[in-house]
Structure formats: structure tokens, C-alpha cells
Amino acid sequence: MSDNASSAAAGGQAPPKKPCPKLRYVSYGAEKESPFLPAIRQLISNDLSEPYSIYVYRYFLYQWGHLCFMALDQKDNLIGVIVCKLEPHRGGPMRGYIAMLATRKDYRGHGIATSLVKTAVEKMIAEDADEIALETEVDNIPSLRIYENLGFIRTKRLHRYYLNGNTAYRLILYLKPGIPFKTTFPPDYGMPVSDPAAAQGLIGEDLYARQASQALIEDVHGEQFDITKAAKSDDF
Ligand SMILES: CC(C)(COP(=O)(O)OP(=O)(O)OC[C@H]1O[C@@H](n2cnc3c(N)ncnc32)[C@H](O)[C@@H]1OP(=O)(O)O)[C@@H](O)C(=O)NCCC(=O)NCCS
């Protein structure tokens, strides 16, 4: 997720903060074109620089609407939203992916995005996710704080990842011990799969990156750290 407003959020002129209203956190559900879709597009396009078309929203919401959560005030105004998906990653772990996250500027700093991320993570855990990934700009401090507070770790730096040329971190929350060791397979580029050397090279590259992540987890949390337990505990 690339963020037009990250510099503003990270120290520029912030709009006056409103007191936090009582909010409901609800899932988008199984609806296809819900009445909330225009508000979701509006909120996300205000802040994220990637020019997502309606097809991108439909791709996520038609298939994984139950993994999209909205923070609504008492008049059903949209205050925040998170859009996710969950599917096997390269034939390996079941990977949840946080595609978009935004809260209204005048309600930031009240923990709304944190609550949206926790709600989505809990739902993906309930659906047996092995890990949850996302990308965010390297200078998006509020976003990095939210995810790192919840146990996500930086696994890759993606140079000039976004269309605006900005660089991203990939962050991953590993939900089960040993997940980085799970074998993954190269994407099908239409090359003959009979070339074991090429295939092995790609498998190896992905595996090494994941093993490095496992080493990092053990380094940061100690060998006995049980991510699943941490993810379910209140202070997660
Ligand atoms: C990132 C974003 C979703 C955060 O929403 P929010 O509702 O304000 O988030 P929260 O209140 O849950 O938490 C924000 C965290 O960032 C911190 N933070 C907020 N502004 C900050 C700033 N200017 N500098 C440093 N930290 C800041 C908060 O202190 C909090 O961390 P803490 O819990 O350790 O104190 C919101 O700023 C936004 O919509 N930005 C534009 C879109 C975007 O960047 N999306 C994420 C891309 S991956």
C-alpha cells in the first residue's frame, strides 16, 4: 500500500483530531456491490497513491468480502476500512494479505486502524492462516508502528516498489512455528517445468528468504516464542 499522505501523517500538518466516536467494526460480508463500496473507494483513494480501478476492489471484495472490515459511526459513516485476501502462497503456506488500510484523517490516532488490523488478523487466524503479509512505504511511520506493535516483522525491502517510485517494506506476521521453512514453488512463467535447475534456484531463493525470517523471529522473540499464542492474547 502506498500512501500519499505518509509525510503528512509522519509529521506534516495534521487536521484537527476529533474525539473518537463510538464505532462498530463490521465485515463487508458476502455482498457484491454493497452500498459501502463508493465510500470505501473514496476513503482509500484519498490517501493511497496507487490508482486502484473498480476491478481491483471487486477482485478483493467479491472473493474475500468477509475479510474486509469497516469501522462505522452511529450514522453508518465510514471512518476506516481494511481490505484483505487469504489464499495459498506459491503452493505453500496459507497466506493472508492486507491489501489496503485507511482511516479518515480527522479520526486518526485513536487506535482505529489497529482495531481493524486486529479484527482482520483474528478472522484470518480463525480461517487457519499460516502467515499474513503486506507492503508499506518505508517512511510510513504510523503504518509501521501499527504492524510492528502487533508482531509483524520486516522481511524484504522492495526498491521502488510503488508506481510513484517509492520503496516499500514487506512485513509478515508468522502465525505458526516453522512456517518460514515450508516449501514454496516458483510461479508459473510458462517456462518448461522440466528444468529442475531453474526451478530449484527459485525455490531455493524463496526458501532462503523465509529461513532468514525464521532466524529473525528466533532472534527477536527467543526460540520458545509461540506466535499463535501471542496472536490470540489480549496484549497482541
Ligand atoms: C496509517 C493509518 C491507517 C493509521 O490509522 P490510525 O487510525 O491513526 O492508526 P492507530 O491510531 O491505530 O495507530 C497509529 C500508530 O501510529 C502512531 N502514529 C500516528 N501518527 C504518528 C506520527 N506522526 N509519527 C509517529 N507515529 C505516529 C500512533 O502513535 C500509533 O502507534 P502507537 O499505538 O504505538 O502509539 C492512517 O494514518 C492512514 O489512513 N494513512 C493513510 C493510508 C495508509 O498509509 N495506509 C497504510 C498503508 S499500509
Image (cartoon, grey):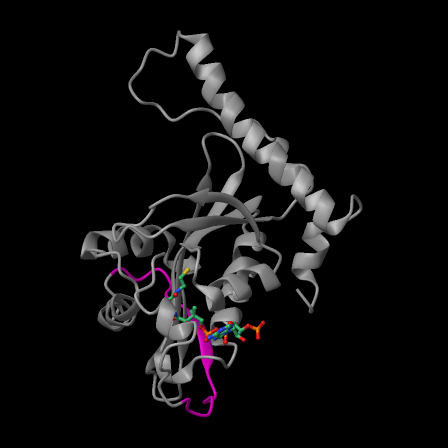
Seen at 36% across and 58% down, the residue is 65
The boundaries of the magenta stretch are: 17-32
Residue 93 in view (yes/no): yes
Residue 234: percent from left, percent from top: 69, 69
Query: Is 223 on the left-hand or right-hand side of 155?
Result: right
**For the N terminus, which image quadrant?**
bottom left
In front here: 55 or 222?
222
In front here: 74 or 117?
117
Residue 97 in view (yes/no): no
30 in the magenta segment: yes
**For the C terminus, which image quadrant?**
bottom right
Query: What's the magenta bit mostly, secondary-structure-wise?
Result: loop
Residue 62: percent from left, percent from top: 30, 54
Residue 55: percent from left, percent from top: 20, 52
Seen at 46% across and 9% down, the residue is 197
181 in the magenta segment: no
Query: Is 156 on the left-hand or right-hand side of 59?
Result: right
In front here: 10 or 111?
10
